[in-house]
Amino acid sequence: MHDHRKLGRELDLFDSDPLIGAGLPYWLPDGAVVRHTLEEFVRSLERRAGYKHVCSPVLGKRELYELSGHWSHYSEDMFPPMDLGGEQVVLRPSLCPHHALMFRARPHSYRDLPLRMAELGGMYRAELSGVLGGLSRVRAIQLNDAHVFCTPEQVAEEARAALELVREAHRVLGIKPVRYRLSLPGAGGKYVADPSLWRRSEAVLREVLSDVDYEEAEGEAAFYGPKIDVQIADGAGRESTLSTVQVDFHQPRQFDLHYTGPDGAKHRPVMVHRSVIGSLERVVAHLIELHGGAFPAWLAPTQVVVLPVSESELPRAEEFARSADLRMEVVGPERGSLGARVRAARLVPFQVVIGAREAASGRASVRLRDGGKWEPAPVAEVLARISAAARPGAGDRE
């Protein structure tokens, strides 16, 4: 059983400092590589699914969150307002109010819908210190978020497509959910009081889950509507939510969103909230534990370590490391014997050894971290083979 907090520090992926504060980890170079690679992966996945990417500020006026309903239903989890020039601004607890304003800022026809708006954006939660832990529970969150604005007739299809996008991402990442959960409202006043909207949203999500085994959980819904939660578990069996799909009839009404229908009249869109890989912090925590730090080749901070046997082969090794768009590091004999360097690079997917024979012939041999080997081959062929094996979803042995 791996603990991402211990491994993350041992592998120099992330750390924290009391002067920055609890629940506010910082990313070291190798951790930043993993994070940025995940960002590029999910943006590419979203682009292929028809999403348009936007950027929005992490602050908003208090009135924005009063309008969205966050202030009345969620303020205990928000940071306190800051006074600024006679106004109060708040660190945002979610991205949806900003995206609703973006939609509202331009006129839309039914022909424009569905409009799929995505962002990898920062948000902040005033978590109590007792629940904070490593990357899995933090106060500054980088969320893979998106909102689909669609017609009522399109909402089931869009929610279903969002769930399939979640599944596709999980397949590539090697993530296996422990269960799907339909999160419903519970007792108390933290939910929007409009039974008809809840019934409509719940009916859509039940339709989306019609071919999926799922469990129901009262009291786990968002304040504005029910949601599908994709649950993961760590090695100790502790569950957390990674990905979500939500149907929201409430905020389009709050923000008076509309589009022009084929009849020329104004109609209210529906918002589908969805997060494919959740927060980057939580998904990286899970992946560290899942892979024990031995990330798939496409995600590994260093994909190839180049090992010249002696100083004489160092120029050839450096030339090799510049020959392809891969994350490569040359580790020369000043760092110890070849055996010691191989052992130190045990988590790197590919170890390219260049001895006198390889340097003279323009060839290279490859050791794999699972103990396998590739026969010596021309450098161009080796690089092409590594590049193919380092694509998302490819096996490291290709």
Image (cartoon, grey):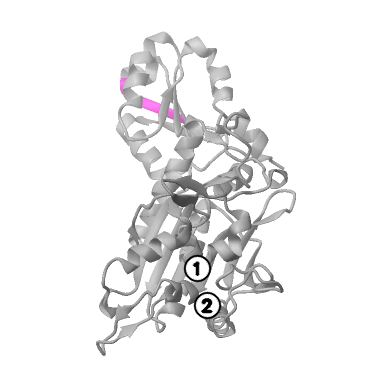
| Amino acid type, mark 2 | Val
Residue 131 relative to residue 244: left or right:
right
Residue 4 lies in the magenta-colored region: no
Mark 1 = which residue? 163
Among numbered discs 1 and 2, the one appearing first in the sequence: 1
Question: In this picture, is 374 found above or below 396?
Answer: above
Identify the residue shown where x is 45% and y is 61%: 64
Residue 1 picture location, percent across and down: 72, 43
Q: Is the C-beta separation of discs 1 and 2 under 8 Å?
A: yes
Find numbered disc 2 in the image and state the secondary structure of the residue it sits on.
helix
Which residues, given as a range, are shown in magenta?
Answer: 361-367
Q: Is residue 291 above or below residue 253?
A: above
In three-dimensional space, the C-alpha distance between marks 1 and 2, rounded to whole angstroms, equals 8 Å
Residue lying at 55% horizontally and 45% vertically, measured from the top left: 284
Q: Which mark is residue 208?
A: 2
Please provide percent x and percent y for residue 359: 35, 18
Q: Nearer the viewer, residue 67 or 128?
A: 67
